[in-house]
Amino acid sequence: MPDSISNIVFGNEQQLFKHLLLEDDEPAVELEDKWIGPYRLMKLLGEGGFGQVWLAEQNEPVRREVALKLLKRGMDSDQVLARFSLERQALASMDHPNIAALLDAGSTPDGRPYFVMDYVQGVPVTTWCQEKHASIRDSVGLFKQICSGLQHAHQKGIIHRDLKPSNVLVTEVDGVAIPKIIDFGIAKATSDQFQDQPWVTRQGHVMGTPLYMSPEQLAGGLDVDTRSDIYSLGVLFYEMLTGTAPHEGKTHACMSHEEMRRIVDETRPIRPSVHLTELKRQRGIVTKVHDLKPESALIIPADLDWIILKALERERERRYDSAALMATDLQCFLNDEPILARPPTAHYLVSLWIKRNSIIFAAACICALALLLGTGLALWQAHEARQAQARAETESQRARQAVDFLTTMLDRVADEVANGRNPEALKLALDGSQEKIRQIKGDPLLQSDLFNRLGIVYITMGERALAVPMLKACIETTAALYGPDSEEAWTAELNYLSHEMQHGARILVPEMLEALMKRIEAAGKSGSGHWFSVQRYRVQIWGKLRKPAKSSQVAHEVIQDPRLEKVAPLGRLMIKSACANAFESHHEYDLADKVLMDCDQLCLSDPVLITDRLPWIDDQRLNVQKTKGDYRRGSELARELISELKVRSGGQHPFLIKFLLRQAEFENALKHPAEAIALAREALQLAEDLAPTPEALRLNSKLPSLRLEQMFARFSVADYEYQAGHREEAIKMSREAYRIAEEEGNKADLAEAMLFLAKMLEKTGDLEGAYHIYELRGQRSAIAGANYQRWHEDLNFRCGIRFKQGRAKEALVLAQELWSKEIQSPEARKDIEHLRDVAALALRCYDALKKQDPAVSAPAELVEWQKLRNGK
Amino acid sequence: MQTPQSEFPHTRWTLLLTLREGSPEKSKDALEALCRAYWFPLYVVARKRLSEFDAEDAVQGFFLSLLRRDALTQVDESRGRLRTFLLTAFENFCNQQWERQNTQKRGGEIEHIQLFTVQGAESRYIKHAEASTDDVETLYNREWARTVLEASLEALSQDYAERGQKARFDLLAAHLTQEDPEISMAQSALSAGMTAEAYRTALHRMRQQYRGKIESELARTLDTTDAGVIREELHELFRAFS
């Protein structure tokens, strides 16, 4: 700070302030009743950065009331008036019912410029719409008048340059609303004053936001024409309909031109209809305009969207050429005729989308989903996003619909998600998107892609029942496009079967696989990648259906097939590991281990597989030792793998948590409880250490949350603590696991954690507590499972508890309920063994009841149960 | 908006948020801007309790702790005044520092990264505040107000200089503070070859612009354009000197 400046200030602060504050607006009282030229100031109407507006009375030549705008002191009145006089003639020639005429201008004796105009007793147009709960048609009608006024001015060669709600006032004459544009000519006359000033300090005073300025005005160009006004009109209309200006949410109070310009450059305004829906949903901040109106009135028709967006085009060549044209389009809209404004061309949108892609899509969408669903999906989505982008560049039509779909979905979700993870909101949005996908016409490829995408999102969310129809729809659309025996259709079918196998009606899968296999062979593609995929699923499905011999048999055939070596590395790895799994289930441990060692080698020879898949294969190797029961070897192997992975990853790899838990399991099996507890706790500690803080997750939602790992580590600690007799610790850990699952919000995991807690309570003797958790679990996760075997397991467990408690009567009621639910499901009816289990449970309950009360009447289902139990 | 002469390029709250969430490089820039505005006011607060060097260390340490983001966890959307927030945070920082030193003995715990210091802070302190018996908050507010006044005036002088009106600025600035300028103003006008009327208008305009600079600075710290709030803040700054 130069001394000269400090010296002016120091010691003189009081004087400085006094002068500055004296310079403050002349107190209104002093001006009241004063004369300025032929005008007597009567009442202060308003005050702002520019100066004051007075209601004044004119006596000569006619007696009338006028509005007098008195500018701040400090404006160069000579210049202002000089500029004004240039336009004066034009201004005077304006005569239109929607324009407040400018009557006079001059300067006060102490050099303050002033303008005199028709006195309009009205409220800003947006306020009017809000207060009157104007319907869409009302607003359009009002707006058309504004257009007409502006058109008149433009024809006289006058550009307004400062259209905003406070410059468009609505008065009511005989109950008819008439908008009037005020302040014509003033912005131009005073504008050069502001050139070198930052926006907030127009001549030293804070002004409003630049929300209504056109991009070219924001850029500070002198080349401003009538189309700038069209842009401002667009903003105004947007606000009349939705209650907020297009970029209002993104701006803050103190906005410079530069910042506003960046926003306008980088983002396209959200379509008014979407914006309004959005506002409606966030009831907290609710839309100011349409608050109390019936829902139906709240929908902004798509045509209006396009009309507004056309006015808001960044390049003025794309806007309406004139206000009249815009009014005409609005009339077409009112008459239900085709409008001029059309959706922006695909090419144009795609170029914008790609620009926006990185911002909205990557940031909001992927992060939001990752936040919800964990990294797996995020990575998948990122990959998908890249692909989508690549597609967008070549296939514009698809991209446009993809954009529509994704933005609609994400717009809805992003905010809620940003304010805390809200799977319900996501689900709501997804449900809505389904309809959208079905409506996509003429692009089955995109449609099937989106169905698939949505299916996977559902699965990741644990909404498996909802996923199945999506995946089926994906097959149908693909088959319709390429033919049912195209590779594309096979891929879709395999995809569906894989999920049906993992989470769905397994019992139906083998048949479908056989059928698919035959079709692939009939097409001469035996030994192809698809064919091997089917083989892999066959190996897996028999394992899942607990037919290890069958599974192993298929696996032997597959692994000996010489064509296997021609399959791509990742595919080969998947097939081999599936086979190893089958051998393991069939107690062929050494063979399983050998195949997995092969897999290890395969991973080590491929740079991608080594990071992605090696720990996964190693984990499977540990599992083989576990199933084999060779705990000593298992523990050794675990120790080796842990130290290897520690070195490879610097102690940071999430799989370390898994391996530690494996080792703990082995130590526990070797009857080393202290070691087991220590290892499990080490794993828990690591999971907590590696887990990002909520803050970090907020900043980078792509981070793996490790919530599942934390949950499983707690399960283990709880188990071992329980076995060591530390019941309270065990229950505490189980409850924490439940809490974490709840935080994560994934229904499948929540069900898992609740099951664990209930079992723990049951084991520690708190039967009522367990019963309660089972009941809760049934309510909270009933719709989640698509696997009939587990649909009603909560009922099953509750029944078991009542049975244990000796409350046989209640147990029987539950058993009957369970039975009736099971036989309602076609999948369960096909699985005799499953039904046999249910029948056996029910019979046990009935037997117990009969012991308590020999006179009890037999339930209607008794004969059926007995038949099943006796193996018929 | 970020003209080179602008002493206060950002919203201060935005600065704090940048400090908390920005890249290391951006954080550093943000910190420097904060330092420029608040270093001396905080120095005065510290100096009332500490020796010259300890006070300097404390302020320095405080800003470094901002860089380490210790104090920033309290920054939230509820805003309030940044000025008040910094004072409170600084006092907390000093208290903690005092406790730490009492339990640990002194060590070289303050890293000496030279971020920013006010040149001649001590002599400025002696001139501005040493003799004062007012409480630290008043002193702090006063120094902050001075910083605003000085920085805004400096920015204004650069505006004039850029328009080639350095001489006019110097001439008019002398009258910015005068109580009864009529006579001397007439003389100055005469010597500048202006009419008294033109001179008065020029001075008017300068005051107007000066006030504009101050208000936009206040608007940024308060992150509002509400003229009422800004006027209130202006009056509050005024009160620091009465």
Image: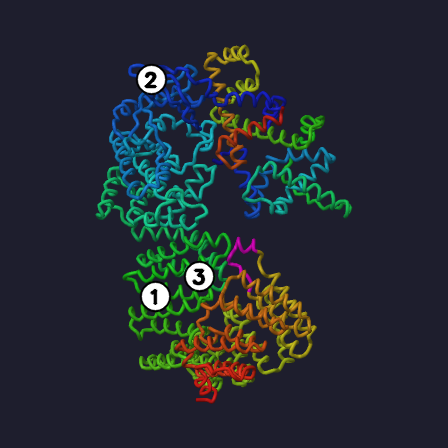
| Residue occupied by mark 1 | A448
Depth check: give the residue in front, B180 or A653: B180
Please rate how many residues cluster around mark 1, counting C-alpha atoms within 10 Å: few if below 14, some from 14 to 19, many from 20.
many
Label 1 and label 3 in one chain: yes
| Cα gap from disc 2 to disc 1, whole angstroms | 73 Å
Horizontal side of A57 relative to A581 (left or right) equals left
- Magenta stretch: includes residue A701: yes
Question: With A767 as the anchor, is B105 left or right in this view?
Answer: right
Q: Which percent across, then down, holds residue A830?
A: 41, 81
User: Distance from label 2 to label 3 (Cα)?
Assistant: 69 Å
| Sooner in the amino-acid sequence: mark 2 or mark 1 | 2
Sort mark 3 into few (<14), some (14-19) or many (20+) by Cα contacts within 10 Å.
many
- Residue lying at 74% horizontally and 46% vertically, measured from the top left: B100
- The answer to whether residue A647 is visible is no
Three-letter code for the amino acid on which mark 1 is drawn: Ser
Task: Output the chain of dot 3.
Answer: A
Residue placed under numbered mark 2 in the picture: A58
**Residue A251 seen in render:** yes
Tell me which amino acid carries mark 2.
Answer: Gln
Q: Start and end of the magenta stretch? A: A694-707
Q: Position of residue B123 (x, y in %)?
A: 69, 28
- The figure's colour scheme reads rainbow
Q: Amino acid at mark 3?
A: Gln
Residue A153: x %, y % from top left: 27, 30
Residue position marked by numbered label 3 in the rendering: A381
Q: What chain does mark 2 sit on? A: A
Question: Which secondary structure lies at badge 1?
Answer: helix
Which label lies toward us, 1 or 3?
1
